[in-house]
Image (cartoon, grey):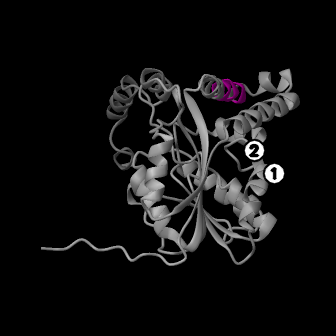
Amino acid sequence: MGFLRRGGSKKAGAAEQAAKSAEPSKKDSVFKAPRPPSGPQDPAWPKPRVRLMDRMWGVGHVLPGGDDHVVDLFRVFSPNNSMSMLQIGAGQGGDGRALALAFGVWVTSIEQSEVLVESGMRESYKHGLEKKAPVVSFVPERLKLRPSGFDVVFSRLGMHTLPDKDLTITQMAEGLKPGGQMLLIELMPGEKADPRVLEGWADQEPQRPYLVSGPKMAELIRGQDLDLRVVQDVSADYRKMVMLGFAKFLGTLSRKELEEDRELGRALLKEAEMWMRRMALIDTGVLRVVRFHAIAPQTKRRKKLPTVE
């Protein structure tokens, strides 16, 4: 009776054990179940690259310049704690936090990469800026801003990866309050642009760029009834900031750290190659970094809605 309670005779038990031992064990199996991802994943922004950005450009930044550059850039807007701003393609939201801390402005940073959104929002919470400088994800094709919701709408090297510039500029203009201001700093084809060279460069970028010319961008801005006040080539400024950022970071990096943190070393190599390609095209006039500053009219014209037949 005892054997029956345990599933049968000794002979049956031995046969069962032999059958089990003939089966491949999980340990020996070729198949391994994939581990669930720990948080959002983005091929363009692996974790070592995000860590590198914090050390190269300043905590929470993914672009050269850091806090000091952003604060100086926005002094012209006379920012104060009653103003609301929105940044498109904001990375980890470092620009927004710098402005909120320096001037008390309210900045909403929107970004496509969930990796950068998560990292940026953690940083905003750390500074108590989760409401004053939040980092929010968005889908470019479904971008729709609150009408007349912002005093300033801006993008700093955050639009060249968006394919539909017309939609983006239209939404940015729609989001401006009467008399509000738009600031764009963007990569564009230079005076010596070669389509084949630009295509080869685009294939090597972490995120594929979709460039439009300076005149085309100006046309899109003016087409929204905005007064385009400034079109300025700022390539030289960005070149200096890139070189300074790399020099400062390399000055803090030891051989031991590179040996112990191989992932950081690989991320550094890729980042250096990316910026070297960009700088080489800027130096030869194939690429440019251009700043656009436009102002919305004090009284916005009511747009005529399409007739439904």
Quick check: 186 above or below 236? below
Label placed on residue 68:
1
Which residue type does callout 2 highlight?
Gly
Label placed on residue 179:
none
Q: Is 269 in the magenta?
A: yes
Image location of residue 259, percent across then percent down: 78, 21
Q: Is residue 275 left or right of residue 31?
A: right
286 or 146, nearer to the observer:
286
Quadrant assignment, res 65? top right
Q: Is residue 194 left or right of residue 295?
A: left
10 or 258, nearer to the observer:
258
Quick check: 134 above or below 45? below
Q: Are the two marked residues, 2 and 1, in contact with CB atoms closer than 8 angstroms?
A: yes
Q: Is 180 in the magenta?
A: no
Highlighted range, magenta: 264-272
Image location of residue 110, percent across then percent down: 55, 58
Residue at 39% in and 77% down: 302
Residue situated furthest left in the rendering: 309
Image location of residue 111, percent across then percent down: 55, 54
State the residue position of label 2.
Answer: 65
Quadrant assignment, res 140? bottom left
Residue at 76% in and 71% down: 104
